[in-house]
Amino acid sequence: MIKKYYDQDCNLGLLDGKTVAIIGFGSQGHAHAENLHESGVNVVVGLRPGSRHVAMAEKAGLKVMGIEEAAEAGDFVMILTPDELQAQIYKDQIAPHLHAGNVLMFAHGFNIHFKQIIPPADVDVVMVAPKGPGHIVRDMYTQGQGVPSLIAVYQDASGKAKDYALAYASGIGAGRAGILETTFKEETETDLFGEQAVLCGGVCELMKAGFDTLTEAGYAPEMAYFECIHEMKMIVDLIYTKGFEMMRYSISNTAEYGDYITGPKVITKESREGMKKVLSDIQDGTFASNFIQEFNAGGKANFYAMRAKQAEHPTTEVGKELRSMMSWLNDEKEVN
Ligand code: NDP
Ligand code: MG
């Protein structure tokens, strides 16, 4: 088990007299900036010209400046822009303003681990990665609670890199819930694996395969959509809040029996072999290099083609129709 750190293990005082520059004010950026500010840390927010977030950051009482200006002002520079843009932003607007003794920070290890960003040797490089989206990081903080977060040290030039990461994590409220130490490598590889094999790739393909099996057997697409897609949320919510045991306690005995005998017939030895291949493509950099090629050099042509192809699946149509019958779904405000 990973050792956990709490507020009493963190020295927020290490940030006294320091300036923390938060680059970007999106999902994570707004939460880190506002939480640190309310924890008494001197925060500046770096945004591109014309950013639609300037007014929002200023309304929160934060000092807003250009990205280069913020990088210059910051003793700590936390990069919270989309991952595929970070290398370019770093090269053009941050690297020239990093000075010896600064702390370069990330909330995800991708760019450091896959060497898209190669920092100078005289700065600390650390990660503070909340295990939740920004609006929850913000909401929990305002309620006196926190979101468990990961920290990692990639480069320790000062000898204090881990203490700095703990201080920052405490400043965003993570020390109230627990801080877990990992490495850039472990965080990056497990994050990519989880989203590809299970959360996004695995789950969506499983749902579609179930839907296709029923509709190809002549069942109504509406029934297939309810049973294989819509009701996923109910099950996942039970697992999310109480684990597999409570989910199984809540479902019928028929469902629980079917769960045990059928799961391994669908996720077979072959599926598990597929997962191992996914993992080795992540570990040896194959996935990262394909992704970078597609997004930076390839103009995203394949990416858009795959998106269009997915949209042609019959679940798109029937899903739209069924969701429009559920008034409570239409009220739900879009989350960042
Ligand atoms: P967002 O997509 O929400 O970031 C948006 C911010 O980036 C905005 O302020 C936007 O500027 C700025 N931005 C976008 N493009 C550019 C550009 N070309 N130049 C300058 N600024 C730009 O990012 P997230 O918060 O989702 O992710 C940030 C980091 O946090 C990533 O490393 C991610 O992996 C990590 N992370 C994200 C989590 C999440 O739940 N979202 C969870 C844990 C980690 P503008 O204000 O002009 O729109
Ligand atoms: Mg993730």
Image (cartoon, rainbow, N blue to C red):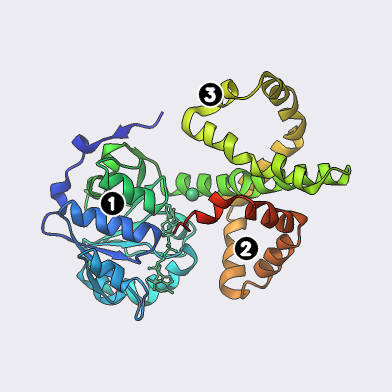
Label 2 sits on what residue type?
Asn
The disc at residue 43 is none
Q: Is residue 219 above or below residue 117?
A: above
Which of the two labelled residues, at mark 3 and mark 1, occupies the earlier sequence position? 1
Task: Please report whichever mark, 2 or 3, sits nearer to the chain's N-terminal start.
Answer: 3
- SS for dot 1: loop
Residue 295, quarter of picture:
bottom right
Badge number at residue 290: 2
The residue under label 1 is 156
Coordinates of residue 70 in the picture (x, y in percent): 25, 71
- For marks 1 and 2, give the CA distance: 30 Å
User: Badge 2: how crowded within 10 Å, few (<14), some, or many (20+)?
Assistant: few
**Looking at the image, which is closer to me, 130 or 134?**
134
Instruction: Give the x, y percent position of residue 139.
Output: 32, 48
> In the rendered view, does 253 fall on the left or right side of 69?
right
In this rendering, which labeled residue sits more in front, label 3 or label 1? 3
The alpha-carbon separation of the residues under discs 2 and 3 comes to: 40 Å
In the displayed orientation, state which residue is furthest to the left: 17
| Quadrant location of the N terminus in the rendered image | top left
Q: CA distance from mark 3 to mark 1?
A: 43 Å
The three-letter code of the residue at mark 1 reads: Asp
Residue 228: which quarter of the image?
A: top right
**Residue identified by numbered label 3:** 246
Q: Determine whether, in the image, residue 223 is placed left or right of residue 241.
A: right
Whether 14 is drawn above or below 87: the answer is above
Depicted 131 relative to depicted 82: above or below: above
Structural crowding at the residue carrying mark 1, measured as other residues with C-alpha within 10 Å and reported as few (<14), some (14–19) or many (≥20): some
